[in-house]
Image (spheres, rainbow, N blue to C red):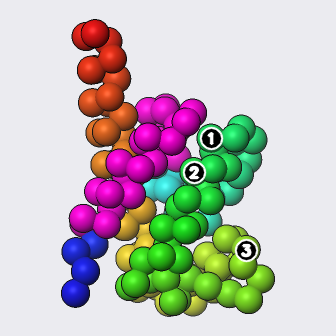
Amino acid sequence: MENLDLCCAKFGRMLSAMDGVDEKLLQDSLSVLEEQGLYAFFLYLEAHGKEPGKKAMAECYKFFLDNPVIGQKFQVSTNNVFDAVLELSQSLGDLILARELLIQALIYARYHSKAKGRSVSKA
């Protein structure tokens, strides 16, 4: 059995290390995810229009595909993130699990980003 919290922590650390992904993008996308849901989260990152948002969107999609618990349920033949979310939405339990995993990963990413910011400002 895989430790999902550890998967979220590793993914969060990787997200915070991506070029251009800053604390504001992480906080804003986390807010959209918590308030509006998974579909809106991916739509927000795509609409963000900048390279970091699109890269983060692709990595979040890959996070789901690579996750052994949710990955097999998060795939459709079109390989489109929006179609995958709609397909996943057929099962409320799977949708909630995916949302909670991503929330946890974004929280860890935000904390990593804050820690990185403090160490830079002290130098």
| Mark 3 crowdedness (10 Å alpha carbons): few <14, some 14-19, many ≥20 | few
Disc 2 secondary structure class = helix
| Mark 1 crowdedness (10 Å alpha carbons): few <14, some 14-19, many ≥20 | some
Query: Residue drawn 55% across and 36% down?
Result: 19
User: Who is closer to the viewer here, 28 or 16?
Assistant: 16
**Alpha carbon separation for disc pair 1 and 2:** 6 Å
The three-letter code of the residue at mark 1 reads: Pro
> Which residue position is annotated with label 2?
56
Place of residue 46 in the rendered image (x, y in percent of width and height, measured from the top left)? 71, 51
Q: Which mark is residue 52?
A: 1
User: Who is closer to the viewer here, 81 or 62?
Assistant: 62
Place of residue 95 in the rendered image (x, y in percent of width and height, measured from the top left)? 47, 78
Query: Residue drawn 40% across and 84% down?
Result: 68
Q: Is residue 84 magenta?
A: no
The three-letter code of the residue at mark 2 reads: Ala
Place of residue 117 in the rendered image (x, y in percent of width and height, measured from the top left)? 34, 23
Q: Which mark is residue 80?
A: 3
The quadrant in which the N terminus is found is bottom left
Which label's residue is closer to the chain start, 3 or 2? 2
Q: Which residues are magenta?
A: 5-29
Disc 3 secondary structure class = loop
Does residue 40 appear anywhere in the picture? no
Query: Residue drawn 61% across and 56% down?
Result: 57
Disc 1 secondary structure class = helix
Q: Which mark is residue 41?
A: none
Place of residue 42 in the rendered image (x, y in percent of width and height, measured from the top left)? 62, 59
User: Who is closer to the viewer here, 28 or 111?
Assistant: 111
Question: Do labels 1 and 2 touch, CB within 8 Å?
Answer: yes
